[in-house]
């Protein structure tokens, strides 16, 4: 069982992650754990810094629907993505802009979380995680 901590007094559950690109060192990420998001999202600036381009590496143009509207972006496969003590190679993320001022690089959504069994202990500021059996 892996344990990840977060600030229990914060407005959002912020966790750290890492993403690898094309022959680059990994980039450290500040991510919101979002069980309501279907996809894992990374802002386009980070995707660009990793050496990817929407034209050359994007898999498809995509639109995310949320409670506040429709956000346009694109799906792209990154070399590796790590969060909550676990990682995936050739992981597909949605590149899209997020509201200014949040100070985050993206969201960890169900595209990553669905492979896990996890328990969020909000009062303790802990997330308990294990890979779900296949």
Image (spheres, rainbow, N blue to C red):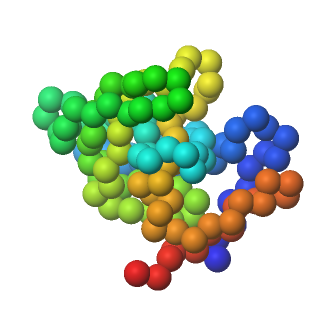
Where residue 11 appears, x then y in whole percent?
76, 35
The image position of residue 131, as x and y in percent, is 51, 74
**Relative to 113, is 121 on the left or the right?**
right
Residue furthest left in the image: 56
* Relative height, residue 99 to residue 87 (above, below): above
Where residue 42 sits, quadrant-wise, is top left
| Residue at x 58%, y 60% (from the top left corner) | 84
Q: Nearer the viewer, residue 125 or 70?
A: 70
From the viewer's side, name the closer residue of 92 and 83: 92
For the point 57% across and 71% down, the residue is 117
Is 2 drawn above or below residue 7 in the view shown? Answer: below
Residue 118 x/y as whole percent: 62, 67
Q: How many marks?
A: 0
- Side (left or right) of 101 relative to 89: right
Query: Could you say which quadrant of the image residue 62 lies in?
Result: top left
Residue 44 in sight in this render = no
Report the side of 84 relative to 46 (left or right).
right
Q: Position of residue 73 (x, y in %)?
A: 32, 28
**Residue 58 relative to residue 81: left or right:** left
Which residue is found at the position 78% from the left and 60% from the top?
Answer: 121
Q: Is residue 76 above or below residue 65?
A: below
Q: Residue at x 27, y 40 (%)?
A: 75
Residue found at the very far top of the displayed protein: 100
From the image, which quarter does the C terminus lie in? bottom left
User: Dividing the picture into quarters, in which one does residue 102 lie?
Assistant: top right
Quadrant holding the N terminus: bottom right
Residue 95 visible (yes or no): yes
Whether 21 is drawn above or below 90: the answer is: above
Instruction: State the residue in front, 105 or 132.
Output: 132
């Amino acid at each position: 069982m892996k344990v990840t901590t977060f600030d229990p007094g914060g407005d959002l559950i912020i966790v750290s992650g890492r993403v690898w690109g094309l022959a680059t060192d990994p980039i450290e990420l500040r991510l919101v754990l979002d069980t309501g998001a279907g996809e894992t999202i990374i802002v386009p600036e980070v995707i660009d810094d990793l050496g990817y381009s929407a034209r050359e590496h994007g898999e498809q143009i995509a639109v995310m629907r949320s409670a506040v509207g429709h956000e346009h972006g694109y799906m792209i496969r990154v070399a590796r993505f790590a969060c909550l003590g676990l990682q995936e190679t050739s992981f597909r993320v949605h590149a899209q802009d997020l509201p200014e001022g949040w100070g985050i690089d993206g969201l960890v959504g169900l595209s990553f979380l669905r492979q896990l069994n996890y328990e969020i202990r909000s009062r303790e500021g802990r997330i308990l995680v294990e890979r779900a059996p296949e």
